[in-house]
Amino acid sequence: MKATVLEFHDIAPEVRHFVFEVPGVQQLHFKPGQFVSLNETLNGKKITRPYSIVSLPDGNRFELCLNLVHEGAFTPHLFAMQPGDSIEMSAPLGFFTVRDPAKDALFIATGTGIAPFRSMAPGYLSHPHAQRLTLLFGVRHQHTIYYRDDFDALARTHPNFRFWPVLSRADSSWAGRAGHVQSHLSEALAGRTDLDVYICGLKAMVDDVRGILKELGFDRKQIIFEKYD
Ligand SMILES: Cc1cc2nc3c(=O)[nH]c(=O)nc-3n(C[C@H](O)[C@H](O)[C@H](O)COP(=O)(O)OP(=O)(O)OC[C@H]3O[C@@H](n4cnc5c(N)ncnc54)[C@H](O)[C@@H]3O)c2cc1C
């Protein structure tokens, strides 16, 4: 399968939101939370990288949220793509999907780790038995809380949804949560150990949060995670 870039826009420094379509396909089937693998031969070497889909199923379109890794083998190529350019891709895959919307859940993301949650949250909240959902989203600065409008809108229409951005480099104008997402776990859990916790981002954060949850008595099955590196 090939994916063609329809458009893109920068949503933070070095973070780009892409809209792709898959020509010749009517409906790209996927579960929110799944990823596609993009691949390209660069300097004679075939490189494949997975990317979480940041959008909901919508015909043959899908969207990605990509972080530019300057010294990376693949992302500089993706950031050089222009509307009309194509790249090979796999069918959507992955098990980082909502397990049980009838259980309270905590979503924890840092950086582009927010991507699967933007796709998962609306479905979770529109389930007839949806319970309370909290999203802790760690980024550096206030102007880099990407998709903020989308999550604020969800919170307005779903009183059982709490969107908690956490800034690691907050300036004095920020009155919200600051520091690392780890520091706000206990506030989000409020002493409970019976909910499902979904974690997505770089290994260091994911492992740290998993360690804290295990110490608190969470069972392995309640901790669902996707590591980006
Ligand atoms: C299931 C899955 C889903 C993913 N979804 C996304 C996504 O939606 N958006 C996205 O930007 N990336 C995502 N990634 C990471 C992506 O696959 C690549 O690893 C990333 O784009 C870097 O590729 P590269 O070849 O440019 O860098 P490489 O040459 O592979 O170098 C990677 C190095 O860059 C650092 N790094 C900085 N930011 C990132 C990052 N975001 N991801 C990985 N490594 C990073 C790592 O610590 C690592 O040392 C996902 C990874 C997995 C396993």
Image (tube, rainbow, N blue to C red):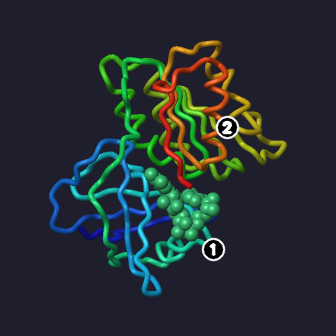
Q: Residue 25 versus residue 224: which sits nearer the camera?
A: 224
Mark 2 and mark 1 in contact (Cβ < 8 Å)? no
Residue drawn at (33%, 56%), measured in percent from left and top? 62
Please state which amino acid type lies under the numbered disc 1. Glu
Q: Residue 108 at what x, y percent from top left?
A: 57, 36
The x and y percentages for residue 195 are: 50, 19
Q: Which image quadrant: the N terminus?
A: bottom left
In the rendering, at what x and y percent does residue 119 appear?
39, 43
Question: Where is 57 relative to 75, above or below?
Answer: above
Residue 125 in percent (x, y) is at 39, 27
Between marks 1 and 2, how big is the CA–CA gap?
Answer: 25 Å
Q: Residue at horizontal 50%, vertical 72%?
A: 74
User: Which structural element holds mark 2?
Assistant: helix
64 left or right of 134 in image: left
Taking depth in this image into account, of 46 and 200 the one nearest to the observer is 46
Residue at numbered disc 2: 208
Q: Earlier in the sequence, mark 1 or mark 2?
A: 1
Q: Residue furthest bottom?
A: 43
Please tell me which residue is depicted at 76% across the width and 34% down the height of the picture: 175
Quadrant in the picture for residue 217: top right
Q: Quadrant of the C terminus?
A: bottom right
Residue 6 visible in the snapshot: yes
What residue is disc 1 on?
Answer: 71
Query: Relative to 178, is 87 above or below?
Result: below
Say which amino acid is labelled 2: Asp
Name the quadrant containing residue 20: bottom left
Q: Is residue 197 left or right of residue 110?
A: left
Residue 12 visible in the snapshot? no
